[in-house]
Amino acid sequence: MLELMIMKIFILGLVASFLLITKSYSLSCGLESDVLTKHTRDGYLEINIYNSNSKPVNISSIKYFDDNKNLVREYDLFKRINSKSNLAFSHSTNRAFLKKVTSINFGCKISEPRYIKPKTTKPKSGAQKWLDKIRGN
């Protein structure tokens, strides 16, 4: 019984330490952010995102949160990240605003691959066939 409890605590500690050691953190839509650098002096945010999904992700907005996890501001943003690939970009904003912000997240949607139906020609009517025969086509 005691050994089982020790084993559970050990595994829980191992998982917690792994989560604390990893550099990337999870965002919405299965995106992972490896690099998130805040340049408060120049007023921009440097973002490097990895899409671990097997489908592309469309980012529609960037959301800024304060210390209390309250939404401070949301900006429209139109980016597309293909499956299993990185996207690096910077987002410019106000210097004073960046000082208040502690975390970000994205409004996004996992897009389904589009299926384009092959174009088929419409079968000719009887009258059209008759006209083609007269013309010699």
Image: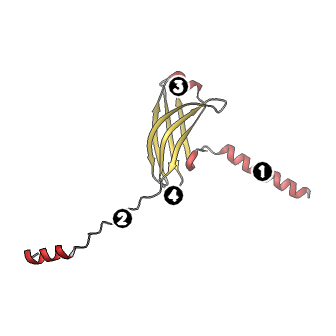
Nearer to us: label 2 or label 1: 2
Q: Give the Cα separation between the discs numbered 3 and 4.
A: 34 Å
The image quadrant that residue 67 belongs to is top right
Q: Is residue 41 above or below residue 110?
A: above
**Residue 117: mark in rendering:** 2
Cα distance, mark 1 to mark 3?
37 Å
| Quarter of the picture holding the C terminus | bottom left
What amino acid type is highlighted by mark number 4? Ser
Q: Residue furthest right?
A: 1
Q: Secondary structure beneath disc 2? A: loop
- Label 4 Cα neighbours within 10 Å, binned few <14 / some 14-19 / many ≥20: few
Q: What's the CA distance linking mark 4 and mark 2?
A: 22 Å
Label 2 packing within 10 angstroms: few (<14), some (14-19), many (20+): few
Query: The N terminus lies in which quarter of the figure?
Result: bottom right
Q: Which mark is residue 54?
A: 4
Identify the image quadrant of residue 23: top right
- Which residue has dot 3 on it? 40
Q: Which residue appears farthest toward the front when viewing the image?
A: 127
Q: Does residue 119 appear left or right of residue 114 in this picture? A: left
Q: Amino acid at mark 2?
A: Lys
Category of crowding for the residue at label 3, using alpha-carbon neighbours closer than 10 angstroms: few (below 14), some (14–19), many (at least 20): some
- Residue denoted by label 1: 12
Sequence-wise first label, 3 or 4: 3
Callout 1 environment at 10 Å: few (<14), some (14 to 19), or many (20+)? few
**Which amino acid type is marked by label 1?**
Leu
**Residue 80, percent from left and from top:** 44, 47
Q: Please state which amino acid type lies under the numbered disc 3.
A: Thr
